[in-house]
Image (cartoon, rainbow, N blue to C red):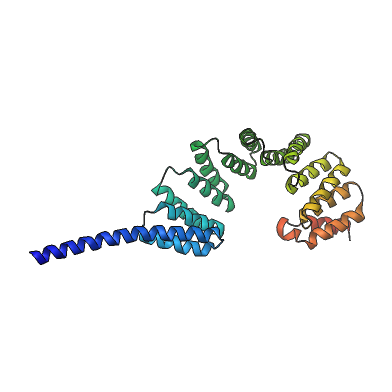
Amino acid sequence: MKSIFRYSIITFCLSLFLIFFACKSDKRHLGAGIKKYTKGDYAGSIEEYTKAIEDKPDYWEAYYNRGLSKFKLKNYSASIDDFKKALDLNPDNVNVYSYIGLNNLSLKKFDKALEAFNKAIDLNPKNPEFRMNRGVIFRELKKYDEALNDFDILIKLDSFKSDGYSYRGNIYNLMNKYSDAINDFNKGISLNPSDTIILNNRGFALMKVKEYDKAINDFNSSMKISPNNSSTYHYRAMTYIEKKDIPNACSDLKKALDLGFTATFGNEAETLYKKHCK
């Protein structure tokens, strides 16, 4: 009996050791994954998170962090799978819905993205990033009134940042409400004078209301900050065309094409160049 009892004690202690070691191991791999993630080694972090999951299959934090790494690597479908698993294990984590939405937005699955951000906003209606991202989805779906509503709320939640004014002004541009757009861009630029997106969008709105010199000033300011942005040259070329200044328009169109406008934005600059410059 003594030998059997001694064996039982040894087996029990060994089991406790293995459980303790496994717990330490999964946390160690999670920590190593986070370190690699912060250093930009997303593939390495995935390896660590996978080891953590192998040690502890119900480790929702490991699934969540592995989903983040896959998102960074633009492996959107696999990232969604990890976030869904994290959600199964921890249904109360609102950020999971946000990342499911962002992955679907990246995949241009706007209806699924909208569903995820609706849930995120239901759980946390005062989160400005959730409002911003849902507004972007509404913009992609051409539901401009709904987008305006979200950006209105975004501005109320975070009125000292330029983002809300930038996004809302962009919607006004799309709705051809250029005066409203200019008012928002004015506010955005007062908060962030070096934001080239706002400068370009205000320049576009000014061009549409025939304030050509003011528009060109905005594009010039944008170029000083970001001299290799092909879209800025394209916008300024459009303004020169409206002014009947074809030589300067052609110079800007050529620069836009040289900077790779077509690969990023499509054939519009090339079409204008063929029409006005050859």
Along the horizontal axis of the image, is 154 left or right of 100?
Answer: right
Residue reaching furthest bottom?
3
> Residue shown at 52%/43% (left/top)?
115
* Residue 258, quarter of picture: bottom right
Q: Position of residue 263 (x, y in %)?
A: 72, 60
**Which corner quadrant holds the N terminus?**
bottom left
The relative height of residue 32 versus residue 129 in the rendered view (above or below) is: below
Q: Position of residue 144 (x, y in %)?
A: 66, 38
> Residue shown at 29%/59% (left/top)?
19
Q: How many marks?
A: 0
**Which corner quadrant holds the C terminus?**
bottom right
The relative height of residue 189 versus residue 7 in the rendered view (above or below) is: above
Q: Position of residue 102 (x, y in %)?
A: 56, 49
Q: Position of residue 143 (x, y in %)?
A: 63, 39
The relative height of residue 259 versus residue 91 in the rendered view (above or below) is: below
Query: Residue 50 versus residue 35: which sits nearer the camera?
Result: 35
Query: Residue 276 versus residue 71: which sits nearer the camera?
Result: 71
> Residue shown at 15%/65% (left/top)?
7
Along the horizontal axis of the image, is 123 left or right of 149?
Answer: left
* Residue 30, quarter of picture: bottom left
Along the horizontal axis of the image, is 82 left or right of 220?
Answer: left
Residue reaching furthest left?
1
